[in-house]
Amino acid sequence: MMKGKKTNNSRLLLFSILAVLIAFGSICTIVSAAETTSEASTEAQVAITNVSLDPAIFMQDDQGTLTVRIANSGTSPVAIDRVELLSEEFKVVNYQTYDKVGTLGEGNSLSFTFVLEADGKDGTFFPIFYVDFTNAGSMRYPVPVKIDDTPIMVSVINSPDTFSAGEEDEITLSVSNPRDNEVNSVTIIPGGQGITSSQTALFIGTLKPDEEKQVTFGITPKQATELVFTTSYRNGPHQHYETLTLPVKIGDRKVAAEIVVNSIEV
């Protein structure tokens, strides 16, 4: 009888240990799942709300800025370790600015501005905006950035074939923007040896895509020379220049003879 009771007690102890182990495993599984769900939802509550480029389209060797804003739409703060911009076609001038970010509170937003320099050829490229969360996970977002080295166009609309020394003649220029983005601070300055202009410079301002404007200069040459028009403009914060050279010839004007009729008899 004692032997039977001992066997029953041993079995009861074994079943109790197994029950405790199963219950502990279930608790661990529940906690682990809860943590995974919490991490996933934390990452999901962070979203990109705005992306802006200046200039909208880069030219070769241009420096500009890319600004990305993220927001936390959840009900708990999100810890962010670092934020980077990854690219082979653009040099990120301030690449270590956001190595340590901190916490993004619920309902709040953060903006990150990167200074870019275009090193690639013409085309559309996709730098990766990368967010590394402190606890776990990351977010990647490709940002389309275009490089187009097309300059503005400056051409002569009206100019005399020959000039007279010491006399003023008018020259009209056409300035147009064939780019897909606007350019700013467009200014034309005339120059050349022995050249006097009634306008030292003409400010055109902003040229929108496919926009054309005309300007007229009063030019007085002292001698045969080259008249040079230098056009400066900004694509974003970067300055660009275009040069138009016009030869100035001194000579007699080709004037058509006027027919004079007199002594008419009827």
Image (cartoon, helix red, strand yellow):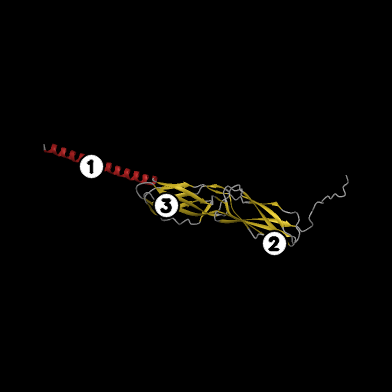
Crowding near pointer 1: few (<14 within 10 Å), some, many (20+)?
Answer: few
Q: Quadrant of the C terminus?
A: top right
Marks 2 and 1: CB-CB under 8 Å? no
Q: Position of residue 120 (x, y in %)?
A: 56, 51
Q: Name the residue carrying label 3.
A: 110
Q: Position of residue 42 (x, y in %)?
A: 37, 46
Report how far apart the C-alphas of labels 2 and 3 lie in the structure. 55 Å
Tell me the residue at 29%/42% (across/down): 30
The secondary element bearing badge 1 is classed as helix
Name the residue type under label 3: Leu
Tell me the residue at 47%/54% (across/down): 113
Q: Earlier in the sequence, mark 2 or mark 1?
A: 1
Viewer-side residue, 252 vs 247: 252
Name the residue type under label 1: Val
Q: Name the residue carrying label 1.
A: 20
Q: Position of residue 248 (x, y in %)?
A: 73, 57
Tag of residue 213: none
Mark in front: 2 vs 1: 2
Q: Name the residue carrying label 2.
A: 196
Q: Quadrant of the N terminus?
A: top left
Viewer-side residue, 113 vs 245: 245
Crowding near pointer 2: few (<14 within 10 Å), some, many (20+)?
Answer: some
